[in-house]
Structure formats: structure tokens, C-alpha cells
Image: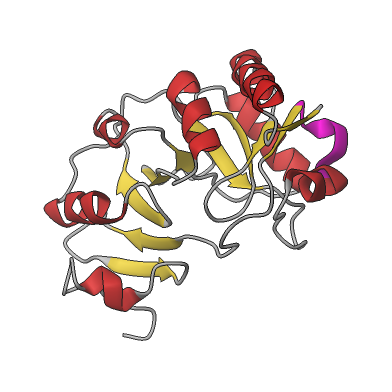
Amino acid sequence: MLYDCSQLAERDRGIAAAIEAVGRGDLVVLPTDTVYGIGADAFKSWSVTALNNAKGSTAPVPVLVGSRHTLDGLVFGLPQAARDLVDAFWPGALTIVVEHAPSLQWDLGGGDGTVAVRMPLHPIALEVLRETGPMAVSSANKQGQPAAETAAEARDQLGYAVSVYLEGGPCPEPVASTIISVTNSEHRVLRAGAIPIEKLREVVPTLIGLDD
């Protein structure tokens, strides 16, 4: 079902329905500050599998969190550079790849002990995430198709595979997040995105770019 979150009452119903759906293990689509995402409970492996099946993808799924403090419970040590980047750019369009805590019982498809994490700058996404906890979230589109910029566009691609669609209007800046690896002594850009490397190097001058 699609909920129009520009209407206050429907927004409240939609967010409640999304939280309940994630708890059941269903898929939801929600707006972020970059593009719309298709999300599932990060700790329900069958939900993550359903997410990849809906997209037609086998790629590891990133995780969205609703608080900076949540990150500390997910990672196996956080380098100072990563902490500085999070302080500077979260919530926002920066994804960091870190070593996750070995004790975490999840299967996001990576298998190398790392996870890509981001805290989005969008009120609807944050409201959902603060209730559900960490969610596995990927762009809300079929593999090879354009990323959805509205929930309606996502529904056209994903259909009944998703239980709840939260329509928050067009994405303000439909550009993917910048991804940085901070898993070792080197800190490297893995994907160029919404935050330019010049801004990132103001915080971490030693950051290695795609062309370095």
C-alpha cells in the first residue's frame, strides 16, 4: 500500500505501517535524502534475501541507521578518521564501509566482515529507523533500471514485492551517496557521489580518491 506522507494523518499511518511491516520481515520503500530505498530488517536473513530477489540483485546490501550512536554497536572498532567523517557529514549522503562486529547475527551478502553504513538526512527515514533499528536498504529499483525518485516510481518497478510504500515527494538531490572504505590504515573513496572529495579531504586530508 502507498501512503502519501504529505498528509499528516496518512504520514503517521504510513510510518506505523512501515514499522510494523519491517517487524514482520516484509519489505518497505521509503524516501531518503539521496534516492528512494527498499528496506528490510537487517537481522532477518530471509528479508534481506527477499530484498535482493525483488531487485534482481546479488550485491551486498548497505545498512541505514537512525542514530550515530547505533554505529558503535555495529562495528569492530572505529578508526578516528571514520569518526571524524561521521561527525562532519552524518546525517547525510556519506556511506562508510567498516568492519562489523563479529558477534552480529546477520547476512547482508558480503561475507568479508565489512558493512556499508549510512545515516540519512530525511525525517521520514529517520523516524522509521529509530523504531526499527538498523535496516538493510538498497536503492528502490530493479537491477539495471533507474533509481526511483518517488515512491510511485518505485512501485512501478517493484510492485507487490513491497508491502508499504511511503511517498515523500521527489528526492531533493537524487544523487547516490559517496562511499568511503575506512577498514584499514588507508581511507579510500569507493564511489563518487553527492559529497565531493574536496569536502571530505577537509576532514581527512589523506583520503585516497578514485584517480589516485
In the rendered structure, the answer to whether residue 165 lies left or right of residue 62 reads right
Q: Residue at x 72, y 54 (%)?
A: 148
**Which residue is more in the foreground, 78 or 30?**
30
Vertical position of residue 97 compared to residue 1: above or below: below
Q: Is residue 75 left or right of residue 10?
A: left
Which quarter of the figure has residue 207? Answer: bottom left
Residue at 77%, 47% in the rendered image: 154
For image coordinates 55% across by 46% down, the residue present is 32
Q: How many marks?
A: 0
Return the x and y of residue 35 as percentages of the image width and height.
61, 54
* Residue 66: percent from left, percent from top: 40, 33
Which of the pair 185/159 is nearer the observer?
159
On the image, the x and y values in percent for residue 161 come to 81, 32
Image side of residue 20 versus residue 92, left or right: right
Find the residue positioned furthest to the left.
80
Colour mode of the rendering: secondary structure
33 up-or-down from 68: above or below: below
Task: State which region is magenta.
Answer: 158-163
78 drawn magenta = no
Q: Quadrant of residue 102?
A: top left
| Nearest the eye: 153 or 24 | 153
Q: Where is residue 81 shown, x and y percent of the image? A: 16, 57
Q: Magenta part mainly helix, strand or loop? A: helix
Quadrant the N terminus occupies: top right
Q: Quadrant of the C terminus?
A: bottom left
- Asked whether residue 159 is drawn in magenta, I would say yes
User: In this view of the protein, which residue sits in the foreground, 121 or 138?
Assistant: 121
